[in-house]
Amino acid sequence: MSNLSKNSPELKCVKAKDYCLSVRDGTHDSPKPVDIGFPLVTSKHLKSGQIEINACYQVAEDDYYEIVKRSKVNQWDVLISMIGTIGEVALVKNEPHFAIKNVGLFKSRSEADGKWLYYYLRTDFAQNYLREISRGTTQQYVPLGSLREMPIYVFDDKSEMSRIANILGTLDDKIENNRKTAKTLEAMAQAIFQSWFVDFDPVRAKMAGESPESICKRLKLTPEILDLFPNRLMDSELGEIPEGWVDGSLGNICSRRSARIGNRDAKVLSAVTEGRLAISDDYFTKRVYSKDIKNYLAVEWYDFAYNPSRINIGSIGMLESHFLGAVSPVYVVFRPVEGYQQFIKLYLRLATTKQWIANFSSGSVRQSLSYDDFAAIPSVIPPKVIIDVFSSIHDFMKHSTDSLYECAIKTSGLRDAILPKLISGEIRVPGLDDGAGQPMSLSSILMFISAFVTFCLVCVTAWMAYQTKRLANYNQEIVKQNRALSKKNDALIQQSERQHKERLRPLCFPITQDSNVIDFNKAITMGAPSSNHGPGIPPHIEFLVCNKGLGPAINLRFHINDIHNRRITKDFMVTHVLPPNEENKFVSHIPPLNMLDENGGLFFGMEPSQVVNDAYFIICEYGSMFSKETFHSIVAKGYRDPSLAGDGKNQWRLNRPLTPPVEFRLGLDPSKPIWPLPPEDANYSAEFLNLSSPPENGQST
């Protein structure tokens, strides 16, 4: 410190208590926290020249006013941490409404004095002095008396000090603006994620009948992107989700990794509470990992890793750089499905996801989350086409954010490089020769620095504009390709649906208990599953139903209709799902063909005289997983044969594909068939299915 004035004889030394109106500290008491009150700033809330107000706890109004009687903070005052972490400095740029505890307070005489003192306290000269006067072994602190006696070097020319502070302030403002813009872009990416994948705003807007132009303007979408979202929501275990999206879990879009580092070179990573993977050597002040990392888990680009015992406090992150990382063997490493990296990254930031992590974490002393439990966390799974569009938007925003942070870092480097030289007088104002033997003025230096920074920003802005246009063109091309692919997929689905309708072939095999299979052209005997046959027992029949379609058939039901296609029995066999290329056997008694239910009531409000009971259809009704529609197939046709009724046991015939002697009439609209016509069943003639008008009720032909 004694050599500082040798760089410039015009520098003089004054004590802090003389430079400032006063030098004080905050309260030493510990006011009780309250939910609503005034922030209480301590030393830990001063970081990198900023006051982290949001991290402070609140104190009651009475406690606040009691503290400010001793140490009221005003605009342009300077705060300094004096307990624990020594030397963090902050300039109060706005009128404050907070109290301080165990924080040094320099009461400034003016804005210019406050700015000069703030930058002076950030120099190595001032920081070295603070380390020299600090006390304590377990926890260091700076005595208030030593702060008051602290030497402050100033110029005789106050205007020169003001201009130097303005130079440094201009650079600080540029750094702060870049960081704020970067944070705004990050918030925008999270807001888009929330709108698309949590609140489903585009889908809800469509359901509400809002015009596409209005939706695009309000949600900042292009028509091509809006077309990718469905028009309605459907119920699921997660609640309402867009139609066609999957109600799944994180395990559907990620897989665990267990590769070891071995002899490869890698950087050791740690999952930190900020929700990212940090290089351990850069983040920690001492070594926190083993010398031998051969058994460490490998982490590659876009892999996630987390500490099972610390994920509940945010220790999970994704590697977003092109190098090989390594984490402790106790970690869990997983890789997202291609394209879903940013989706998982932002999904983990949601409060609901954090609550699921807390719920699934187990352990009495220290909670831990296994990969199986992590993979079970519920999540809606959007289609890949929408994920690709979101990822391209997010990647552009992230690239812009990284550029802004990089610009802020470089500007910080420039500020930190000239700060000690300006404060010490090594770079004078005036202090440079303009080529004519005259010293350059401070305004010339400021103009040069400002022009250089402006030039850099113009270059970055022009480059970002070029990349924006290039990305927009790329996105439009991707959207066009996705729309074409979507149309192609729709066509394939429709083709599959048609094939599904035609190829779900229920095959029927009626059998008796006499150990001989009856041909379709033979009668079904009366009989129960036992060998003792008795009169009045309905026919026993076994169906072998085989799904030859391309998709699952759901809710298969069997019932009997009369020749006018009116149901005359309840469902007598039901199954829920029949996957493709699988078959199932159904064994049942065919119900009596009459209109009376168990209580003697009428089915469907028809009189028994209106029902033709001498002939019938056995109908298979089923749903499609593709379109949720319901289809029907004719399983068999049967009729009552009086020639078999002599002993009271055999009176029903099942006939397929031959046409029975009774003419079957459906009475359906030929333009709206209820079920597809089986192509191989030639005996189901067009005349049989396409009757122009139904016969009269009760009439048989």
Image (cartoon, grey):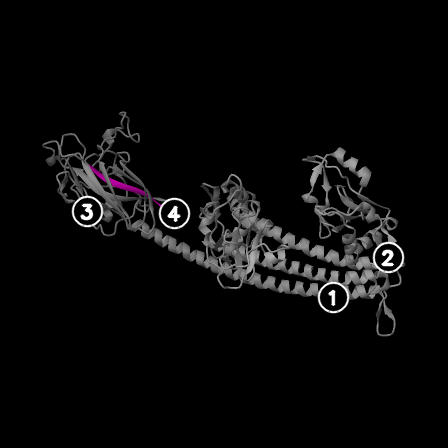
Task: Of the two numbered discs 4 and 2 on the same chain, state the one appearing first in sequence.
Answer: 2
Of badges 4 and 1, nearer the viewer stands 1
Of badges 1 and 2, nearer the viewer stands 2
Q: Amino acid at mark 1?
A: Phe
Whole-number angstrom distance, CA of label 1 to CA of label 2: 28 Å
Q: Which residue in the protein does label 4 denote?
A: 627
Q: Amino acid at mark 2?
A: Val
Residue in the picture at 76% in, 39% down: 28
Q: Residues within 10 Å of mark 4 (few under 14, many from 20)?
A: few
Whole-number angstrom distance, CA of label 4 to CA of label 2: 81 Å
Residue in the picture at 72% in, 58% down: 174
Label 3, secondary structure: give it.
Answer: loop
Q: Which residue in the protein does label 2 denote?
A: 154
Q: Which residue in the protein does label 3 denote?
A: 657
In the depicted structure, whether residue 569 falls above or below residue 322: above
Whole-number angstrom distance, CA of label 4 to CA of label 3: 30 Å
Task: Of the two numbered discs 4 and 1 on the same chain, state the one appearing first in sequence.
Answer: 1
Q: At which x and y percent is residue 151?
A: 84, 54
Q: Which residue in the protein does label 1 denote?
A: 452
